[in-house]
Image: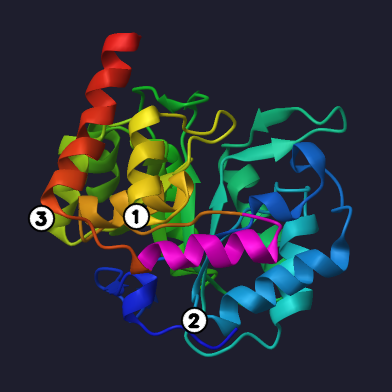
Amino acid sequence: MSEMTEATLGGRFRFPGTSLTVQRIGYGAMQLAGPGVWGPPKDYDGAIAVLREAVAAGVNHIDTADFYGPHITNQIIGQALRPYPKGLVIVTKLGGRRLPDKSWQPAISPQDLSEGVHDNLRNLGLEALDIVNYRAIGAIHGPAEGSIAKQVTALADLRRKGLIRHIGLSNVTAAQIAEAQAITDIVCVQNNYNLTQRQDDSLIDDLARQGIPYVPYFPLGGFTPLQSSTLSDVAGRLGATPMQVALAWLLHRSPNILLIPGTSSVAHLRENLAAGQLAFSPQVLEDLDGIAATAKVAH
């Protein structure tokens, strides 16, 4: 696959107050681990191939976490891409750990966060992490109010030590973002958002005014993929897949949205990246915007 042009990956966006500029379509590495985000993948060479294909296509924003696997995903990234190409931005997250029973547990004490940074550094083979997102505890599909000052202060201390270059947040409310911004600069926010989950509409607009990127996780619905007759109809009209349309809608929604769709398939990766080439008419945008209202009524 020849390298895609800047325009086809949605254009570029610079993390505020940094020298880090990325294509708006990136890659989320969670699916590189085995089933249930646990253990090695069934096709290890295939996982390596997906990462190398993404970078060859122009992707320079990779989202990961050392608790994917655990450790496995970061090790695959290091094996596939080191020495890392100039301009590649690796964003990781802290706030969780995996136990031997495969459960997901909080890891939010200052010691937990420090150990998490060192785990990421070791398994990625880096001396400093570009961006670390603190993932706040909340519901699985959304944030819950509560102070995150202790955790953000701990990350700011690690930044002063040179282990972290920049700090972001995940699974947070507007109040938590404001609390964190009183402690340190926040360069990105990562929350659950897609065509049907639009509770962050006003937050996205507020962050856009501040020049802060919003990175939706579960951009395709997560563990329950998006299903909509309207989405399927629009995809048919455009000669695209429903998932391509859902990704392209996010790019159209706001210029500060960055995408990190994940896959363990090279063919699926190419489909995701091609979403940046879709153009929408005003009617198509209106049809797609109506999906959220329909979903709201259905619930």
Q: Quadrant of residue 275?
A: bottom left
What number is the disc on residue 142?
none
Residue 126 shows in the view: no
Picture coordinates of residue 227, whole percent (x, y): 46, 29
Picture coordinates of residue 64, whole percent (x, y): 60, 57
Does the segment drawn in magenta span residue 275? yes
Q: Earlier in the sequence, mark 1 or mark 3?
A: 3
Q: Quadrant of residue 97?
A: top right
What number is the disc on residue 238?
1
Q: Which amino acid type is marked by label 2?
A: Gly
- Residue at image x 22%, y 22%? 293
Whole-Å distance between the Cαs marked 1 and 3? 31 Å
Q: Secondary structure at mark 1?
A: helix
Picture coordinates of residue 118, whole percent (x, y): 68, 61
Nearer to us in this view, 237 or 100: 237
Q: Secondary structure at mark 3?
A: helix
**Viewer-nearest of discs 3 and 2:** 2
- Quick check: 215 left or right of 266? left
**Viewer-nearest of discs 2 and 1:** 1
Q: Earlier in the sequence, mark 2 or mark 1?
A: 2
The residue indicated by pointer 2 is 58
Label the magenta part by its dominant secondary structure. helix
The residue indicated by pointer 3 is 209
Q: Which amino acid type is marked by label 3?
A: Arg
Nearer to us in this view, 190 or 42: 42
Q: Quadrant of residue 149?
A: top left
Picture coordinates of residue 58, whole percent (x, y): 49, 81
Highlighted range, magenta: 263-276
Q: Earlier in the sequence, mark 3 or mark 2?
A: 2
Q: Are marks 3 and 2 in contact (CB under 8 Å)?
A: no
